[in-house]
Image (cartoon, rainbow, N blue to C red):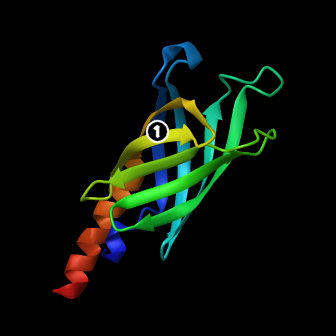
């Protein structure tokens, strides 16, 4: 894994439920920081499932990356949700997308898919940094 393949940066995403009775797709924004094999992040998403919370929910991500595999827990900070959902996914070869599945280990009926994509601003910064690195290496 090259340094330019770091997952650190701004992302936008969406998670879906396998069973639509649990909810509709939810979009969210995330900022990830990758240090070695450790992956951390913050998520902001609309509140679609908690009547006792504000319109926007905040969560922290803690996990790991091993090659193209990522795994992280998503812990909401606005309330105690008991067991946080576990996300497991794959990073594409250009480190611009992460896709996979999420679930609650002790509640296997609530699960679904997720997709993360670098935001346009992050992609522009990454492309510019790669071009600069090529010039410096030349």
Name the spot of residue 18 as percent of width and height, x first.
45, 24
Query: At 35% across and 53% down in the image, what residue appears?
Result: 90
Residue found at the very far top of the displayed protein: 21
Q: Which residue is mark 1?
A: 13
Name the spot of residue 28 as percent of width and height, x first.
54, 36
Query: At 30% across and 64% down in the image, what residue appears?
Result: 128
Element type at mark 1: strand
**Would residue 137 be found to the left or right of residue 121 on screen?**
left
Query: At 56% across and 61% down in the image, what residue appears?
Result: 63
**Would residue 54 be found to the left or right of residue 7 on screen?**
right
Q: For label 1, count other residues whose C-alpha is less than 10 Å away and answer few (under 14), some (14-19) or many (20+).
A: many
How many numbered marks does the figure carry? 1
Q: Nearer the viewer, residue 89 or 98?
A: 89
Q: Quadrant of residue 76?
A: top right
Is residue 39 placed above or below 37 in the rendered structure? above
Q: Quadrant of residue 58?
A: top right
The C terminus appears in which quarter of the rendering? bottom left
Is residue 61 placed above or below 19 in the rendered structure? below
Residue found at the very far bottom of the displayed protein: 137
The N terminus appears in which quarter of the rendering? bottom left
Is residue 76 placed above or below 38 in the rendered structure? above
**Would residue 132 be found to the left or right of residue 17 on screen?**
left
Name the spot of residue 71 as percent of width and height, x first.
49, 56
Name the spot of residue 77 as percent of width and height, x first.
76, 45
Q: Nearer the viewer, residue 9 or 116?
A: 116
């Amino acid at each position: 894994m090259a340094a330019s393949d770091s997952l650190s940066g701004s992302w936008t995403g969406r998670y879906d439920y396998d069973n639509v009775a649990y909810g509709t797709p939810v979009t969210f924004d995330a900022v990830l920081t990758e240090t070695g094999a450790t992956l951390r992040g913050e998520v902001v998403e609309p509140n679609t499932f908690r009547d006792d919370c504000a319109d926007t929910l905040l969560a922290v991500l803690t996990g790991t990356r091993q090659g193209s595999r990522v795994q992280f827990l998503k812990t909401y900070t606005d309330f105690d949700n008991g067991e946080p959902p576990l996300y497991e996914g794959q990073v594409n070869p250009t480190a611009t997308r992460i896709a996979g599945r999420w679930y609650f280990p002790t509640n296997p009926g609530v699960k679904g898919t997720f997709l993360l994509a670098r935001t346009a601003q992050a992609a522009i910064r990454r492309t510019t940094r790669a071009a600069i690195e090529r010039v410096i290496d030349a």
